[in-house]
Image (cartoon, rainbow, N blue to C red):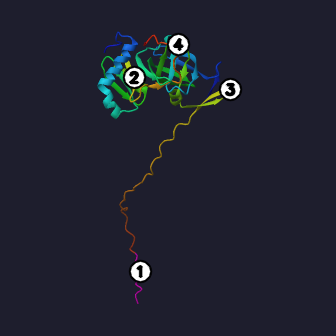
């Protein structure tokens, strides 16, 4: 099953998601699909409060210029395409963009198709990896004793052909 | 178990980094490179997993109100983003 998205006013691909905290109902958001973000979901702090996310952690993130910044973080549940996944949400003070990243695609098992000329975004269900090949099984049949029936008469030994 | 310590986020992150550096870094960089570590700031215990949420879930199963600092073994940042800031200050951490 494919879920379609759209382009926002700045021409970036966006999708519709819902986010819920431990005690709240899902809240809908339009999130930008950012393949330059390695995480699951990045949420501006002002969006995180109404969702009821409980901020219990900190984590460093690496910015595009190579510098590192520490952010508040928490676990949260994201609903998308009829599925829900729990992941780590980065809480961002300086940005107003909601971003979903590569970990989002991995968790929801989707591949992103951006058809810019047609203005179409699709998140297509990615076939799960095939199971590892199973080694050929050697079946060993144990020798069974012969049934207790009278043994057929022994055939006479072949006639000797010695001259 | 204790809950959130009465410190600001910057101090909490620094405390988590210090616990990791002093107690775990040397050993984990030999044994768990690329894995995720959640440090419980109240107990100073470390929880290692293949995924970030896995490490946090392990910690929260033992201390549901624990405040954590998450680290990726061998990397300066747990995640990468495709943007940077120009002359902006983060009031939470600077």
Q: Which residue is mark 2?
A: B70
Span highlighted in magenta in the image: A155-163
Q: Residues within 10 Å of mark 4 (few under 14, many from 20)?
A: some
Quarter of the image containing the N terminus of chain B?
Answer: top left
Q: Does the segment drawn in magenta span residue A158?
A: yes
Q: What is the x, y in percent for residue A30? A: 59, 18
Q: Would residue B85 be found to the left or right of residue B62 on screen?
A: right
Quarter of the image containing the C terminus of chain B?
Answer: top left
Q: Closer to the camera, A115 or B56?
A: A115
Q: Secondary structure at mark 4?
A: helix
Mark 3–mark 1 CB contact (< 8 Å): no
Residue, x 36% and y 13% (percent of image)?
Answer: B11
Residue, x 57% and y 17% (percent of image)?
Answer: A29
Q: What is the x, y in percent for residue A93? A: 49, 13
In the drawing, what numbered circle is on residue A158? Answer: 1
Q: Which residue is mark 4?
A: A47
Q: What is the x, y in percent for residue B22? A: 30, 24
Q: Would residue A35 be found to the left or right of residue A57 on screen?
A: right
Q: Secondary structure at mark 1?
A: loop
* Residue depth check, mark 2 versus mark 4: number of the one nearer the observer: 2
Task: Judge if badges 1 and 2 mark residues of a common chain.
Answer: no
Spatial CA span between label 2 and label 4: 22 Å
Q: Secondary structure at mark 3?
A: loop
Q: Which residue is mark 3?
A: A119
Spatial CA span between label 4 and label 3: 27 Å
In the drawing, what numbered circle is on residue A137? Answer: none
């Amino acid at each position: 099953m494919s879920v379609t998205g759209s382009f926002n006013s700045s021409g970036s691909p966006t999708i519709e998601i819902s986010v819920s905290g431990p005690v709240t109902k899902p809240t809908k958001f339009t999130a930008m699909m950012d393949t330059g973000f390695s995480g699951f979901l990045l949420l501006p702090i002002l969006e995180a409060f109404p969702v009821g996310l409980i901020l219990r952690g900190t984590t460093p993130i690496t910015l595009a210029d190579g510098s590192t910044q520490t952010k508040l973080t928490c676990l949260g549940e994201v609903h998308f395409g009829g599925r829900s996944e729990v992941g780590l949400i980065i809480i961002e003070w300086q940005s107003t963009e909601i971003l979903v990243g590569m970990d989002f695609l991995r968790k929801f098992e989707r591949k992103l198709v951006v058809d810019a000329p047609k203005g179409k975004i699709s998140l297509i269900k990615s076939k799960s990896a095939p199971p590892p090949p199973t080694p050929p099984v050697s079946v060993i049949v144990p020798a069974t004793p012969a049934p207790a029936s009278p043994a057929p008469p022994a055939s006479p030994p072949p006639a000797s052909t010695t001259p | 178990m204790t809950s959130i310590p009465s410190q600001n986020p910057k101090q909490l992150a620094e405390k988590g980094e210090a616990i990791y550096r002093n107690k775990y870094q040397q050993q984990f960089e030999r044994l768990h490179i690329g894995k995720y570590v959640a440090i419980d700031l109240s107990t100073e215990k470390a929880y290692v997993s293949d995924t970030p949420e896995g490490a946090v879930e392990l910690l929260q199963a033992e201390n549901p109100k624990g405040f954590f600092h998450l680290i990726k073994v061998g990397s300066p940042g747990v995640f990468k983003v495709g943007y940077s800031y120009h002359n902006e200050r983060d009031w939470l951490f600077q």
